[in-house]
Amino acid sequence: MGKILMLGSNGQIGTVLAGALRMKYGRDQIICSDIRQPISPEGIFLKLDVLDKDSIAKVIDDHGVDQIYHLAAILSASGEKNPLLTWQINMQGLLNVLELGVEKKIKKIFFPSSIAIYGPSTPKVRTPQFGSFMPTTVYGISKITGEMWCEYYHKRFGLDVRSIRYPGVIGWQSLPEGGTTDYAVEIFHGALKSKSYNCFLKENTRLPMIYMDDVIRATIELMEADGKRLRLRSGYNLVGMSFTPKEIAEEIKKHIPDFKIEYNPDFRQNIAESWTESINDQEAKDDWDWKPQYDLAAMTSDMLKMLKDKV
Ligand code: SER
């Protein structure tokens, strides 16, 4: 087996996924990389900029890389502060990976898409795999365009690209940065540190979410699935649960009865309202036997248990 290169390994998902891949395939099989040195690197780490295609090519050659997990991106809320830089990093970064995929005969590529591809014209409830996707954020535009490029490279060059539309990801191991669904992680830190949380979304804003354990399992299962069964090379719809800030606060109160939440919505409210509330992920179930394990209650009790010592 060749090596796996992960681009953007310092992020919320990369941090955890890299550990899971090291456990599965062996410590030295995974090459982590990011634009910045991580605070406490584990395993092999190389500093890499996704816009520097030549340096990525050299790493592929030098280390015998045959799979790439391309996780580097600027998320929804941060992206709105610098739209053109976000487009450049999210889009050119992906095109560099796809081009190298063809040039270097990479066997498999993973590209994360997002619920940010949905927009005001998308059906809000049980959002189907196909529909009207007109996102309002530059992050969302880059992800839906990215999905189309993945599909194109698969059809045109036979590149084995696989992708999931991640909902908001909740985990105790790492902190998200610059996203709109970040509140669902921050709320647990607030609950354990001060029994309070000041939420930047309104109480009834329903969004699709998923627990980190399910994210890691889904990603590895998709990457290991029989390619012949995969009908989609754009992103697969995927969901674990769906809730509002008020509902997660109520769930936390079952464990911490004097937990208090306040609502002070900011610009992220508009982003959240442009997305959808719940998702139909039947294609993922049909094509690679996807099945979530965590609902709101199971996720909340695991988060509080695991985060308690850390906080
Ligand atoms: N978690 C992401 C965000 O909020 C959605 O993919 O931007």
Image: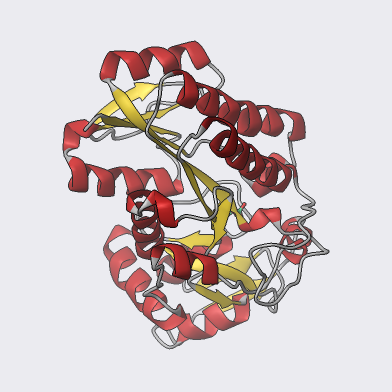
Specify the quadrant of the image occupied by residue 28: top left
Coloring scheme of the render? secondary structure
Quadrant in which the N terminus is drawn: top left
- Asked if one can make out residue 166 in the rendered structure from this viewpoint, the answer is no
Question: Where residue 80 appears, x then y in whole percent?
Answer: 74, 42
Quarter of the render that holds ligand 1: bottom right
Q: State the residue at coordinates (61%, 71%).
A: 279
Q: Is 22 situated left or right of 231 in this image? A: left
Residue 122, x across and y down, in percent: 77, 65
> For this rendering, which residue is in front, 160 or 166?
160
Residue 62 appears in the picture as rendered: yes
* Residue at 54% across, 23% down: 99
Horizontally, residue 144 falls left or right of residue 212, namely right
How many tags in the picture?
A: 0
Q: Position of residue 109 (x, y in %)?
A: 44, 37
The answer to which quarter of the image holds residue 257 is bottom left
Q: Which of 80 and 122 lies nearest the eye of the viewer? A: 122
The residue at the point 19 percent across, 47 percent down is 23
Residue 267 quadrant: bottom right
Q: Nearer the viewer, residue 282 or 245?
A: 282
